[in-house]
Amino acid sequence: MAPATRATLQQALVQALLSRGIVQRAELERLYAELCSALQIPPELDGDLAAIQPRVAAVGLDVRTCHDPVSAAPFVVLINAKADALAEAATPHSPAELQYIKALVDAMFHAPDHRFAVSSTQALQMASQMQPPMTKHAASELLHSLEHRGWIVLSRRTGAYSLSLRALMELDTYLRNEMDECVLECMVCYTIVTVGEVCSTHDCRGAVHTACQDAYRAGHTQCAQCTQPWEPRPVGEAMASVD
Ligand SMILES: [Zn+2]
Ligand SMILES: [Zn+2]
């Protein structure tokens, strides 16, 4: 097959990832199969994902795979590999709005009982505490914009905002640097936990995702961090009560 044709396929793959940001692996496979069939090229998704890596890296992006913290469904995500990912998340917003987004993320990670979520009421109240204060209307618009662009998720059940899987991937470095003492890392897959279980020993940060808990239990009866019996408490927005 002519190299130019595979290059066309890889360019289409880059476009598909750029336009979606994050995509379920299963959906990407379907889309990719259609492209291969249209261009009459044998499919080799993993090879092509590896091949586009240097191209996206040249513009500060990175192709990563991750999994849903509850269902374990695999996703492919195109993330901003630069450390100032939070500033990019705020684009096209003002410095004042960026301050609000930082305060919102901070409140999520400092929420009691490892909820990793902020009620919509609290999110709006925070607007008036900003310097200079933001109107509730402006905060509401910003929250909708962040939700629409896939950075935060509003639970219809609890009315609380939490970070999306994409935001967790993209803000990984920021969260580990800035929220260090509040970040829980999964003892199975080593990514940040906001939905799952945490060790019940006081101050122990041994944690696993909901999707990783069976794998952890299969290999451990104790917490790998504090060596106490593994009797975890739930972590995440599921803990949140309706305001
Ligand atoms: Zn995990
Ligand atoms: Zn522990």
Image (spheres, rainbow, N blue to C red):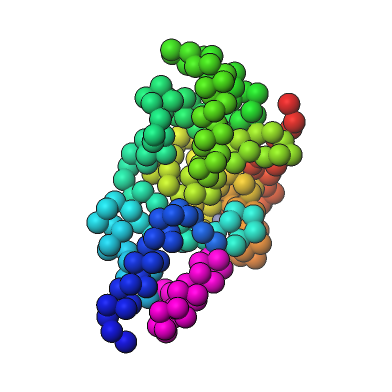
Residue 195 magenta-highlighted: no
Q: Main secondary structure of the magenta part?
A: helix
Q: Looking at this view, is 32 or 115 the one in front?
A: 32
| In the rendered image, the vertical position of residue 76 relative to residue 135, given as above or below | below
Q: How many numbered dots are placed on residues in this image?
A: 0
Residue 62 in sight from this viewpoint: yes
- Dividing the picture into quadrants, the one containing residue 240 is top right
Residue 185 in sight from this viewpoint: no
Q: Residue pushed farthest bottom?
A: 1
Report the magenta residues as a range.
Answer: 25-46
Question: Residue at coordinates 64% horizontally, 41% vertically from top-left?
Answer: 236
Q: Looking at this view, is 209 or 106 the one in front?
A: 106
Q: Looking at this view, is 150 or 212 the one in front?
A: 150
- Dividing the picture into quadrants, the one containing residue 77 is bottom left
Q: Is residue 234 left or right of residue 37?
A: right
Residue 41 rendering spot, x and y as whole percentages: 40, 83
| In the rendered image, the vertical position of residue 91 relative to residue 9, given as above or below | above
Question: Residue at coordinates 43% horizontally, 59% vertically from top-left?
Answer: 17
Residue 67 rendering spot, x and y as whole percentages: 55, 59
Q: Residue pushed farthest front?
A: 38
Q: Is residue 160 left or right of residue 132?
A: right
Residue 22 rendering spot, x and y as whole percentages: 49, 55
Residue 8 rendering spot, x and y as whole percentages: 33, 72
Q: Dividing the image into 4 quarters, which one contains the C terminus?
A: top right
Q: Dividing the image into 4 quarters, which one contains the N terminus?
A: bottom left
Q: Residue pushed farthest left?
A: 58
Q: Quadrant of ligand 1?
A: bottom right
Question: Residue at coordinates 40% horizontally, 30% vertically from top-left?
Answer: 93
Question: Residue at coordinates 64% horizontally, 28% vertically from top-left?
Answer: 120
Residue 37 magenta-highlighted: yes
